[in-house]
Image (cartoon, helix red, strand yellow):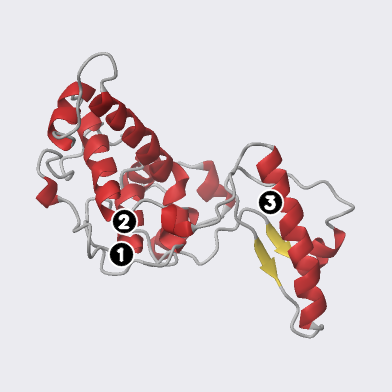
Amino acid sequence: MAESPHPDWLPDWRDASGYPDPDSTSRTQWAWEFLRRNKQYQLDWNQREKPDYSVYFKQQKIDPSDKETYMLVLGTKWGLACYASDPSIGVPEVLLFLETDVAAATTYEDVQKIGRIPYSPRDWPFVNVVFDLELPIHSQIETTKEFLRKTQKNFTDRGKIKPRKDSSRFPGGRLLRDYLRCLDGEAENVSRKEIAEVVFPLVNDDYPDHKAQQKVRDSLTAAKKLVNLKYRYLAKLAN
């Protein structure tokens, strides 16, 4: 059975103190906050006693009785470099994200062939390149640079990414906390007007602009992107 729209473990969105400290919380922890709100992750966790329910896990050929392997594969599926954790846990005992999210598992030989084969990366723009340490490193790096430039241009031309020049522009802790509060308020079926009054009380919400409600809409858009994959990018940024 799927997780309810409003899990009982969510904090009270009206109370900012119930959320991680915006000044001291690591980006890894923020990434977990968004991941554990992902409905499919919640479903995967709830179905952990039935690993044959998903095509993904069938493809991994997991023995239904091997719970340890299932939990490790589940973690990997969601970009974790550790066992999957119960989404109701605010601070898992072990929380590690993969250094790279394999959008296209590419060997150096594939990199060499990249100019001659069609390349259709997935929507999440991360590439894992494997280098051969028995070959000269410099030539591999130069070839890989060209491969990455072509791949980045591919994503950019398709409108999948907008290359960032300064990662410091990524949301800080206070903004991330606002995102979560808006998201949790929506999960409780609260109107955007009421969310705006609580989360953004100092922002003018008068007609015709309704700036506070617009901030709620913008926060929800950003929050849902983080929940649905971009939490992986958030986890990779230095604190």
Residue lying at the far right of the rendered structure: 116
Q: Nearer the viewer, residue 133 or 3?
A: 133
Q: Residue at x 40, y 67 (%)?
A: 82
Can residue 63 be seen at all in this image of the molecule? no
SS at mark 2? helix
In the rendered image, residue 233, in percent from the top left (x then y), is placed at 47, 55
Mark 1 and mark 3: Cα distance apart in space: 28 Å
Q: Amino acid at mark 3?
A: Gln
Q: Is residue 146 left or right of residue 4?
A: right
Q: Which residue is mark 1?
A: 26
Mark 3 and mark 2: Cα distance apart in space: 26 Å
Q: Nearer the viewer, residue 35 or 163?
A: 163
Q: Which residue is mark 3?
A: 152
Q: Nearer the viewer, residue 200 or 126?
A: 200
Quadrant in the picture for residue 69: bottom left
Q: Nearer the viewer, residue 49 or 148?
A: 148
Q: Is residue 39 left or right of residue 104?
A: left
Q: Which residue is mark 2?
A: 30
In the rendered image, residue 211, in percent from the top left (x then y), is placed at 27, 26
Q: Residues within 10 Å of mark 1 (few under 14, many from 20)?
A: some
Number of callouts in the render?
3
Can residue 72 be seen at all in this image of the molecule? yes
Quadrant in the picture for residue 186: top left
In the rendered image, residue 159, in percent from the top left (x then y), is placed at 63, 36
Quadrant in the picture for residue 130: bottom right
Q: Residue at x 67, y 44 (%)?
A: 155
Q: Residue at x 73, y 44 (%)?
A: 120
Asked if residue 236 is positioned above or below residue 58 in the image, the reply reads below
- Image quarter where the N terminus lies is top left
- Image quarter where the C terminus lies is bottom left
**Cβ atoms at labels 1 and 2 below 8 Å apart:** yes
Q: Amino acid at mark 1?
A: Ser
